[in-house]
Image (cartoon, rainbow, N blue to C red):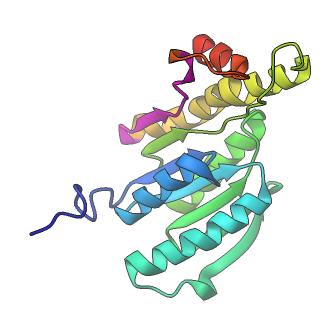
Amino acid sequence: MATEQIFKNDILKGKVAFVTGGGSGICKGMTEAMLRHGAKAAIISRSQDKLDKAAEEMRKEIDLNFGSDTTSNLTHDMYNNLHCTYVYEFFSAIAADVRKPEDIIKAVELTIEKFGRIDILVNGAAGNFLSAIETLSYRAFRTVIEIDLIGTFNTSKACFPHLKKSKGVVINVSANLHYQGMFYHMLIYAHILVS
């Protein structure tokens, strides 16, 4: 018998993931995998466009895996000035900036209100400017440090009380580009070495 996956379909049933940077890239893929295995998830991103696109794609993923038609269950709401999109009872997409503690605290509160717990924190929000150090502005450097380093701290701090209750886990997503030199990645090296 061929094996298509290594985990039980419902291995994450009853678990809730809080994923920054979940609107695109690797963290969106991680969220899809967790949904496939029974978790509920809240993704966080600054970009409403990314969130709307991700919410629609997650709706299709949920329909496929849970056999439900969530078309009528794609709803939008505001919570303490944060825009949120819900897909059925499985998923929410929250527009928030990890650099702003008040945004992340509200996003965590909204996730707890919606799902009752947080078991998995994925710190994946990231910023990067591919630039030679001579042309990289001070502001660009500060922005990346604020998103990648301070945003990780802000999110972890806001989630820790809930992770302690659930005996949850933290996954910090980072690059391994510091192992080999690459042009225009000086900022990534600095971030990885600091964190």
Q: Residue at x 62, y 34 (%)?
A: 155
Q: Position of residue 32 (x, y in %)?
A: 47, 60
Q: From the viewer's perspective, is 169 left or right of 157?
A: left
Span of residues in magenta: 166-178
Q: Is residue 159 above or below residue 28?
A: above
User: Is residue 127 shown left or right of residue 21?
Assistant: right
Q: Nearer the viewer, residue 33 or 106?
A: 33
Question: Seen in the image, is 21 located left or right of residue 3?
Answer: right
Give the quadrant of the N terminus: bottom left
In the image, what residue occupies the spot 57% across and 56% down?
42
Decide: is 180 above or below 57: above
Asked whether residue 7 is in view, the answer is yes
Q: Residue furthest left?
A: 1
Res. 146 image quadrant: top right
Whether the magenta-drawn stretch holds residue 175 is answered as yes
Q: Nearer the viewer, residue 152 or 137?
A: 137
User: Which residue is painted at 60% across and 82% down in the image?
Assistant: 73
Residue 85: x and y in percent read 69, 67
Instruction: Measuring from the top left, give residue 95's x and y in whole percent.
Output: 75, 54
- Find out whether residue 132 is within the magenta segment: no
In the rendered image, which quarter is residue 66 located in? bottom left
